Image (cartoon, rainbow, N blue to C red):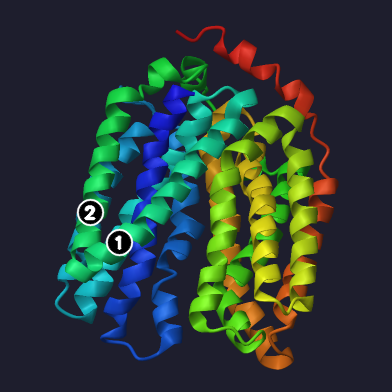
Amino acid sequence: MRKTWLLGFGFFSISITWALYNAFVPYFLERYISSVALIGFFMTIDNYFALFLQPWIGSRSDRTHTRFGRRMPYLLIGMPLGALFTAIIPFHNGLATLLLFMVLMNLAMSLYRSPTVSLMPDITEERRRTRANGIINFMGGVGSILAFGAGSILYNAHPSLPFIAAAVVTLASLLILTVFIKERRDAPGYQAQTEAKSAVSFKKQLNRTTALLLAAIFFWFVAYQGVETLFTLYGKNEMGLTESQASFSLTFFSLAFVLFAIPSGWLGSRFGKKRVISIGVLGLLIVFSLVPLIESLLVLRILLTVGGLFWACININSYPFVVSTGSEDSIGTRTGMYYLVSSLAAISSPPLLGKLIDGMGYSILFYCAAGSMLLALICVLMIRHPESSSHNKPQAASAGAP
């Protein structure tokens, strides 16, 4: 697992960059744009790139064969560019240059996000991937918490400092990855995968199991993204909380997720990914169903804490599950699929649920979220995938590994 912790620095840098970007770029946009809806649109540029570019990059990396490996070339190009465009965002001189730097930064991030995440299953045996995913998500969560804590201090000192710090962290992470992660040495079965002649296509990978799993991912991200985006408004307008009370309440959900990231990966490895995901989906369904009945702030925060634990069960095990349902030479393609459906949910959920709230009131938010989790649970329960047999794959794959 030492390699996993080192690989986690890639996820750590991505999380820090996105956290700082989402926290402070709206302040820059606000100087030029009065419409909150328009600001929100520009802040979702990354999701539109994720819909189209990341799946293509992920699939392309499956078929990239260089002396640096399959994924590393994308990191070597994308991470320096991402660091550069992140660092210059605060130095815009108008709306046009700000939007240009934002687009370039998002393009650069799209070049290496899928390949970075794909490195985890590349260098990890199948039976250890849920634990490995727990580790890199833990590091990503720590990165986000650190970004919010230290980022505000840096921003108060000078608006450019958080972005420069993110660029430095990105370059330092790239150095760690290039020094310690060698795909040809560390990836079990790398040689066999690079000798595969057939190109991996999305169509070939969409078997019944994958389609059901992607549908489940879409539905639970519709619920999660809608609640994450609209919860503070719900707390203020439905429960009568102050803005600070509502926003701080979400911290309990996020902190519980980070603390339970590694244990949930262990549970998935021990008891099976599908079983742990099913428990997480059912648990979060119950939590979302109970929230509209709660009037106490303390009880709300306890529920959100429990919800964060269940979300860890879902989120930590879902990506390794997606990867496990396909061949080893389709990891990048499947990573792209994962980001495709999660990004589609992120784009569609907030405006759709917002429209329902406009017509029916804020109480509908959590009932819709619970309904979406129910659809996700149905999809998961329909999956028939023999996880136990998949544990035999790593021995065969690693037999020829150095």
- The residue mark sitting in front, 1 or 2, is 1
Q: Amino acid at mark 1?
A: Gly
Q: How far from the left and from the top, in percent, is residue 251? A: 53, 63
Position of 126 with respect to 20 (left or right) is right
Verify CB contact (< 8 Å) between mark 1 and mark 2. Answer: yes
Locate the C terminus and report the quarter of the image it occupies.
top left
Q: Name the residue beneath numbered marker 2.
A: 165
Image coords of residue 92 (percent x, y): 17, 72
> What residue lies at 56% left-to-right and 78% top-to-bottom?
232
Q: Position of residue 384 (x, y in %)?
A: 83, 38
- Mark 1 Cα-neighbour bin, 10 Å: few <14, some 14–19, many ≥20: many
Residue 13 shows in this picture: yes
Residue 151 tag number = 1
* Amino acid beneath label 2: Ala
Q: Nearer the viewer, residue 177 or 49?
A: 177
Residue for point 29% across, 46% down? 78
Considering depth in this image, is 53 or 390 the residue closer to the camera?
390
How many marks the image carries: the answer is 2
- Tell which circle, 1 or 2, labels the residue nearer the N-terminal end: 1
User: Residue drawn 79% across and 70% down?
Assistant: 290
Secondary structure under tag 1 reads helix
Q: Compared with residue 297, is residue 357 higher up or lower down, i.e. above or below?
A: below
The structure residue drawn at horizontal position 71% and vertical position 69%, both measured from the top left corner, is: 299
Q: Position of residue 389 (x, y in %)?
A: 77, 21
Q: Quadrant of residue 134?
A: top right
Circle 2 Cα neighbour tier, 10 Å, few/some/many (<14 / 14–19 / ≥20): many
360 relative to 368, above or below: below
Q: Secondary structure at mark 2?
A: helix
Mark on residue 91? none
Rendered image quadrant of residue 227 = bottom right
163 to the left or right of 206? left
